[in-house]
Image (cartoon, rainbow, N blue to C red):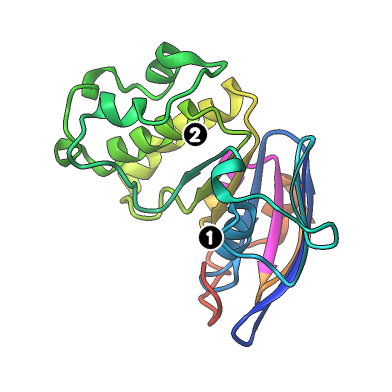
Amino acid sequence: MLTVKLEGTIGNFPIAADIEAGVGVTAIYGPSGAGKSTILRAIAGLWQPDRGFIQVGENVLLDTNGDIDLPTEKRRLGVVFQEPILFPHLSVRANLGFGMKKHETGWDGVIEMLDLGDVIDRMPRHLSGGEAQRVALGRAILSDPQILLLDEPLTGLDDARRAHVLPYLERLRDETTIPIVYVSHHRDEILQLADLIFTIESGTVTGELTPGEFDKKMRPNDVTRQDGAGK
């Protein structure tokens, strides 16, 4: 179970969210600049709202009323950004092993699930964008996170590579019990992956939709850029 309740400002830009979700993929959908990434930063402990409460499972990460604010390194997070951040001097094998802990899927399971066997001994500079993103996902999973935060993980890929990586994200959703928060402004990704969708406009979470409701309500290309705090 994920609970995120927060209010705050970045400069003059207000942020407000009220999110409750279960297992599976919880998507946050809205235009660039609407505040999607700011909510992920709050979950990760990289931004503290003026007022807020964040809980993952039994663990309270933030409670401004109770003076609780766990540092990022104690929140058991797996984070994957739009640009995969790999150690350039380490092989894929070494990148995957960095910070690895025991996990339900296990090393072999993650390698198989993300189809990394053929690239395991390559250096990052010899990976395609899609391969590098799959390595970043694998490293996040192997860190034994309590929750995965995926911030526009496919935006930097062309359509062909996005189509290639999406099935791996589906396997991640279907074959692990890790709750996932998925930020995107791509309607097709949301429909393919999400179990529950929260829409955001101008910094405020405005709706909670099932994929069927989202498909009917949100037409293709109806999201445009807004000025604001971030993605």
Place residue 91 in its image quadrant: top left
Count all numbered tags in the image, as a single digit: 2
- Say which residue appears at 22% left-offset and 40% top-offset: 128
Residue tagged 1:
185
The stretch drawn in magenta includes residue 68? no
Residue nearest the observer in this picture, 41 or 165: 41
In the rendered image, residue 69, in percent from the top left (x then y), is placed at 70, 55
Residue nearest the observer in this picture, 229 or 42: 42
Residue tagged 2:
169
Q: Is residue 221 visible?
A: yes
The stretch drawn in magenta includes residue 193? yes
Q: CA distance from mark 2 to mark 1?
A: 16 Å
Residue nearest the observer in this picture, 19 or 95: 95
Judge the density around disc 1: few (<14), some (14-19), many (≥20) Cα neighbours within 10 Å: many
Q: Secondary structure at mark 2?
A: helix
* Tag 1: amino acid: His
